[in-house]
Amino acid sequence: MSDSGSEWDFTSISSDRAPVNIDTTVAHPARMYDYYLGGKDNFAADRAAADAAMAAAPGMELTARMNRAFLGRAVRFLAESGIKQIIDIGTGIPTAGNTHQVAQEVDPQIRVVYIDNDPMVLIHARALMETQSQGTTTVIQADLREPEAILAHPQVRSLIDFTRPIAVNLVAILHFIKDEENPREILKTLREALPKGSYLVVSHCTLDFTPPEIGAALREIYNKATAPLVPRTHAEILEYFEGFELVEPGLVLPPLWHPDRIVSQEEAENAHFYAGVGRLL
Ligand SMILES: C[S@@+](CC[C@H](N)C(=O)[O-])C[C@H]1O[C@@H](n2cnc3c(N)ncnc32)[C@H](O)[C@@H]1O
């Protein structure tokens, strides 16, 4: 058992053992997120940036936990709604409650394709897949900014049946896509490939509840990381659900989406995120 509380012991990769295509000197959001969640798969630069973010915005680690808990509840909802296939883009370094585990607890036959563009995520996710869920789960390296390549990928095509409803998870990833990279167009490409009855799961960073000076500090920290943070407003995030009908209670603070305990608005506002699930009309 690792210190992260994960069910697997993913031995940390020290900087000198890092794969050649990982620059350990620049903070990476996947590894910062791993650090917020108490994981060990991060380097000094990631920890320094995450520590700075937690100092600037106390509760950042709570934000990560609230987002992760939303992902778990949303995936359970999908599985209980009868979804049999999930494309999870922006997978993150495996930790407790990964998408395929939550889904396959409900139905072991649910198929999951994990997609991330970070080589280190791939190493850890593949290590997990080697011991888990052979045949129902796969991991590929691809970039959300190239949705056509994702849709045409042979492993996606072999595991996912595009004539049956599919859930696409974009959980804590769209805020790494800049406006000039046209996130709405990315969503449109994905949406047009999905049959009716498919689902879209989104969580996204917002500064709607954050004092401006804290927001500015967070932007500055993430601007020095490999992927700058692009927080968006409720109205902007809502636009990603074009063509989808939002499942109740809509696009809300993550702890308020199908809560499994009583959460006050005040507590939920620590999340710096919105979250929602839509069903394709
Ligand atoms: C904050 S983590 C979220 C992990 C997981 N979805 C969750 O919410 O617990 C964001 C992940 O998105 C990945 N990512 C960022 N930009 C990406 C892109 N353009 N294409 C694919 N993955 C990306 C990062 O490598 C990272 O693993």
Image (cartoon, rainbow, N blue to C red):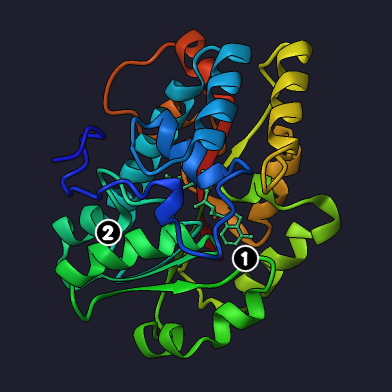
- Asked if 37 appears above or below 241 in the picture, the reply is above
Image mark for residue 239: none
Q: Position of residue 209 (x, y in %)?
A: 66, 17
Q: Position of residue 10 (x, y in %)?
A: 25, 50
Q: Residue at x 27, y 28 (%)?
A: 260
Closer to the chain start, of discs 2 and 1, is 2
**Which quadrant: the C terminus?**
bottom right
The answer to whether residue 201 is visible is no
Q: Is mark 1 within 8 Å of ligand 1?
A: yes
CA distance for labels 2 and 1? 23 Å
Q: Residue at x 38, y 90 (%)?
A: 158
Amino acid found under the numbered disc labelled 1: Leu
State the SS at label 1.
Answer: loop
Image mark for residue 144: 1
Q: How many marks?
A: 2
Looking at the rendered image, the disc whose residue lies closer to the viewer, 2 or 1, is 1
Quarter of the image holding residue 165? bottom left
Q: Residue at x 25, y 48 (%)?
A: 11
- Asked if 167 appears above or below 276 in the picture, the reply is below
Q: Position of residue 222 (x, y in %)?
A: 69, 35
Dot 2 crowding, Cα within 10 Å, few <14, some 14–19, many 20+: many
Q: Nearer the viewer, residue 241 or 158?
A: 158
The answer to whether residue 116 is visible is yes
Q: Position of residue 167 (x, y in %)?
A: 43, 65
From the viewer's perspective, is 39 left or right of 176? left
Q: Where is mark 2, residue-wise?
A: 79
**Which quadrant: the N terminus?**
top left
- Asked if 88 appears above or below 27 in the picture, the reply is below
Dot 1 crowding, Cα within 10 Å, few <14, some 14–19, many 20+: many
From the viewer's perspective, is 207 left or right of 18? right
Q: Residue furthest right?
A: 180
